[in-house]
Amino acid sequence: MLYDNLAVNEAGHLTIGGVDTVYLAEKYGTPLYVLDEDKIRENCRLYVSAMKEHFGSDSLPLFAGKALCFKGMYRVLEQEGLCADVVSPGELYTALAAGFPAERLFFHGNNKTDEDIRYGVDSKIGWFIVDNLNELESLNHYAGEKGIRQKVLLRVTPGIDPHTLEAINTGRIDCQFGSPIETGQAATFVEQALSKENIEIWGFHSHIGSQIFEAEPFCDAVDILLKFAQEMRSRFGFTAQIFNLGGGFGVRYVESDPHVDIPANIRALAEHLKHGCAELSYPQPRVYMEPGRSIVANAGITLYTAGGVKNIEGYRSYVTVDGGMTDNPRYALYGANYTVLMANRMKETATDAYTVAGRCCESGDLIQENVSLPEPRRGDLIAVLTTGAYNFAMSSNYNRICRPAVVMVCAGNDYLTVRRQTFEDLVACDL
Ligand SMILES: *Cc1c(COP(=O)(O)O)cnc(C)c1O
């Protein structure tokens, strides 16, 4: 099995966190997102303990809310002692509505509107991660209006290509996020931030990409950040006390993906940072990281009911499911890999390769191609693994399809955490 929270019971059914997926599908209907709360907590603890041990006790993971955002998630995060990133006023609202402490929130995003900035300041959000000069001006203005000095990190781009998918690669210079170090824009950014009386700058943020399977690209980013920080120290007498290294450790979607030992990578990264600081006689900064995917992806699966099989003579066989790109657009968007299983017939051997198609009116609405399954029958339960990140979060109502419910399993029990949308929800905003 791809992850240790998945197993097969005597009935030949897939289980997650010890709970039978056939039982869950019958109880809550399909399509259904199932999340293993114990696995989420285990992932949180891996980061919290390794970061405190290796980077120092005031270092922390901030959960990247864009990966999975609903109220129940913030309750888990708060209990596990994490901070969280929000990238939009809607994410901020969700976190606050869940009772997540505002001072533990970091406001991200490359185009925060004046309204967003005012909302963040009014909410007493702990931190802004400022993307650019325009935003800096606006934030300085609203913080001044409110009579506060807003704590910020400045987002800089180190210009690193972590050899990942183009679409999820944001550390290189030519991108819409942050201010590039190489062109000198980042230095101007620091100079401007230091001149703003309502801005309190604590350090730098960089995010180099996603699905990174080793410490090396992060070490490269640390080298560039340290050199930059040293330069800012000598030019402006400003010492960055925080390095936020962004998110990005990878997860296994298919058996051939490597396993990432997160604590070992954090240790290697910490040693690299320690060494670099010593070499430059730079005081060691506290470190934040922003894991999204690696906190929730392997805690989630999606359950679908098969509609039937369509054999296109001389071409291929399709199995249709009762969801699709509306609950998981990632294959349609960038060909993301997934493992697909026949959850109610796990002991049967595969007979053929199938293309799993959704129910949307788009030929691109595929969940995965070429998956080996026993011959599907109408009513079979199809499970897609590793869907905890960027599935619910990226879901849509295309074709007026209702968003699925989200169910949590925890210590062998199950509970509803986001209810399924209804047709009334679909027309709720229509006047
Ligand atoms: C997407 C993103 C993350 C999270 O990335 P994962 O690959 O999900 O860990 C963190 N920080 C920033 C700025 C991001 O854009």
Image (tube, rainbow, N blue to C red):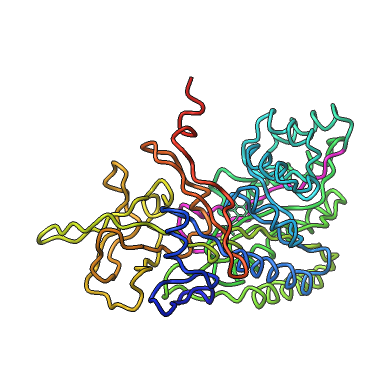
Residue drawn at the location 78% of the way across and 55% of the way down = 231
Residue 239, given in percent of the width and then of the height, sits at 85, 55
Q: Is residue 398 depicted above or below 410 in this figure?
A: above
Residue 417, given in percent of the width and then of the height, sits at 59, 52
Which residue sits furthest left?
Answer: 313
Residue drawn at the location 57% of the way across and 72% of the way down = 214
Residue stretch in magenta = 149-170
Q: Is residue 161 magenta?
A: yes
Q: Is residue 319 depicted above or below 329 in this figure?
A: below
Q: Quadrant of the N terminus?
A: bottom left
Q: Quarter of the image holding residue 171?
A: bottom right
Frontmost residue, 40 versus 281: 40
Q: Is residue 315 magenta?
A: no
Frontmost residue, 253 versus 24: 24
Q: Quarter of the image holding residue 293?
A: bottom right
Residue 177, given in percent of the width and then of the height, sits at 60, 45
Query: In the shown orientation, is residue 114 left or right of residue 358?
Result: right
Query: In the shown orientation, is residue 343 left or right of residue 374?
Result: right
Frontmost residue, 274 versus 53: 53
Residue 122, given in percent of the width and then of the height, sits at 79, 33
Q: Is residue 166 depicted above or below 255 in this figure?
A: above
The total number of labels drawn is 0
